[in-house]
Each structure stands twice: as C-alpha cells, then as structure tokens.
Amino acid sequence: MAKRRKLIAPSAEDLNRYEEEFRRETSPASPMAPIAQVAGESALATPVGTPEGRATAARDSLDAKTLRESEAAGLLIREIPLEQINPEDMVRDRAQLVEEDMLELRSSIEASGLRLPIELYALENTDGPARYGILSGYRRFKAVSGLFALTGDAKYSRIKSLIRKPGSVPEAFAAMVEENEVRAGLSPFERGRIASISVQLGVFATTEESVSKMFAAASKAKRSKIRSFALIFEELGDLLSYPESLSEKQGLRLSAALRGGADSALREALADAAPQDAVAEWAVLEPVVSEFEGNARDERRGGRPSHKKPATKSAVREVKTGAGYTIHREQDSRGYFIRVGGRGVSPEMIDQLIAELQRVLDKSRS
C-alpha cells in the first residue's frame, strides 16, 4: 500500500518568492485596445528611413498628383498615332488649304519639329482605329500626315497632342473658329459658311446665335458682315466657283441684292455661266447685283424694303441635296411650282424628274 504524502503549508518566505517569479514572467496589462497595440507594434517594426528618402517619397507622391490633375485638365502633351485621329469628324471652317502655305508649314516642321501641339477631343461610339477628332490644329495635322506620306519616317507617324474636354459641341465649334481667327484669319465667306453649316447641323438654333457664340470677340459690325456672307452661302453656295475670293465689299453688295429679291436671277446667271476665275465670276454677278441691291432695306435706317415680292407667293422652302443640288418650292395664286438648281442640272435630268412627278400624281388619283 502506497504511503501518502504529507502536505505542508508554504512559509511566508516561499509565498514572497512565488509572487516575485510570477511578476517577472507576466507582462503588465496595456491600457491600449488590442488593435491599437498591434498597429503600434507594426509602426515600430517599419523602418523610418533617412530624411533624404522621405523627401524623395513625398516628391514622388506630389508628382503623381500633379500628373493626374494635368491629365484631367487637358494639359498633358501626348504623342498620338495619326491613325487614331479622324480629321474630318468636325466640319471645318476653313474651306480650302493653300498648297503654298502648306508647303511652308511642312518645311518648318521638318526643320524644327512641331512646336505647338494640336488639340483633340475624344470621339463617342466610334468604329475602327480613330479615337479622337481635331478641335484645333487641322493644318498642322495635315502637314505632319503629309510628311509621313512623303518620307515614311516613323517620327511623323505620331503627333504631339493635348486631349481637351469641350463642355459641348458649340464650344468645340467656337474653339475651332477662335484658333483660326488668331493664327490664320478666315476669309469672309469661310466665316459665313461655318456659321450657316453649324445651324444646318443643329449645333445652333439660328444664324444669329451661331455668329454670336462663335465670333463672340468680334465687333457688332463684323458679326453683321458674317451674317451677310452666311446668306450668300445659303443661297448661292452650291453655284459659286470662287466664293473665297469675294471681297468684303463685293460680298456686302451681293447679300444686299439677295435681300432685294435677286436670288432667282443670280442663280440663273450662274447656272448659265462657266467662269474661269474669280474676276470672270464677279463679272457675271455684278449686273444682277446692280439691278437688285437698291431694293434691300437699309438696316441702319429701319423700315421695310422698297422691293416686295408678290403677295400671292408663299415663303420659299429650300432643300439642299447631298449631291449639291437645291430644290425650291413656292406657291402663287395658280398653285405650287418647283425650281431645281445646281451646276449639274441638265434637260435630261429635268425630264426624268417630270416623269417621276407625273407617276406620283397619277398614282395618287388611283
């Protein structure tokens, strides 16, 4: 039978020794929450680094922020491949490029590079490689793409660009016009042309609005002249061969004649003519202009124009076709009549139109 052990109570000296050992082996309670304690221990474990290292990290963070802000504001210059740019997405205000000027621009870019980036905007719902349209810099784009076509040099396959974010299409049109007004003034006809086209595309509601918004910095007199050339484009743009050569004085006389009722006579004169240059074209127009320009109302004096169209006629409705023809519909006391204009109109075409009209009328009676 096993002998039982005798239990002996510890002495006061033993109890003091046990308590001292317990305190040495147990860490004191922390006043911090556990998650805060873990975070503090991690921070202590992370190397602080040198002052130079901390300064470099701060600069890198600031540079990254500046880069993001510059990109968002459209201030970051990129090199965009030419094939990603659709230069014809927006109707241009400049109707034609003078080859002599383009040759000079290409030579400058070839010698010194492109000093000023073009401005682009992102296209929406595009098919194919094109991702951007041109807001400003159309001539520079044409010059660089021309150099690439001539030389095949890869350095001309891309172009320095700023990606802008115009708030609306009207702002984009205004920016395009402003760029050309500052760098290479438009002809009076080109100003009127883009003002009228922007209305036809639905960018602006009226010619008055388009001129006011796109040429906001122009004087009141200059905006009035632009509206006069817009009228010339609307009435005669499909028949004029040298409209950019019209002087300001000629254009104002021509628009006065149109307001005086010369539209039909002018169109007939142009349809029968084949001028070889701008001087010959004005020689065709000038007799008709002289006959009708006095009929227009002087807007500075107010009042109604002295020339009045027959009261029996309704307002003219005009339709422009994609092929450059115009169709006028008018009405008088005897009924409706249709007038077709355009440089390519021929007797055979009119005969076909009459036959088609007869078919439609006969079908409507059946």
Image: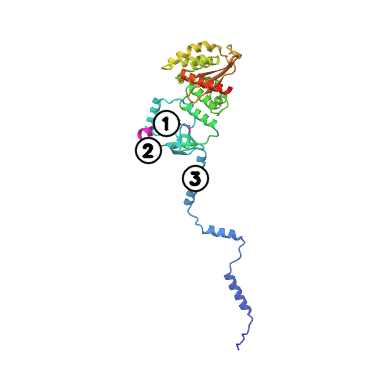
Looking at the image, tell me whether mark 1 or mark 2 is earlier in sequence order: 1
Q: Mark 3 points at which residue?
A: 64
Residue appearing at x 36%, y 32% in the figure:
150
Query: Mark number for residue 312?
Result: none
Percent position of residue 33, x then y: 61, 60
Residue 139 highlighted magenta (yes or no): yes
Residue appearing at x 52%, y 40% in the figure:
72
Callout 1: 10 Å neighbours few (<14), some, many (20+)?
Answer: some
Q: Is residue 75 above or below residue 354?
A: below
Q: Name the residue under label 1.
A: 142
- State the residue lying farthest toward the front: 366
From the viewer's side, name the closer residue of 94 and 129.
129
Of labels 3 and 2, the one closer to you? 2
Query: What is the CA distance from the residue labelled 3 to the residue labelled 2?
Result: 30 Å
Q: Is residue 59 above or below residue 122?
A: below
**Mark 3 residue type:** Ala
Percent position of residue 149, x then y: 37, 33
Regarding mark 3 in the picture, which secondary structure is present there? helix
Regarding mark 1 in the picture, which secondary structure is present there? helix
Query: What is the CA distance from the residue labelled 1 to the residue labelled 2?
Result: 16 Å
Callout 2: 10 Å neighbours few (<14), some, many (20+)?
Answer: few
Q: Mark 2 points at which residue?
A: 154
Percent position of residue 248, x then y: 49, 18
Query: What is the CA distance from the residue labelled 1 to the residue labelled 3?
Result: 34 Å
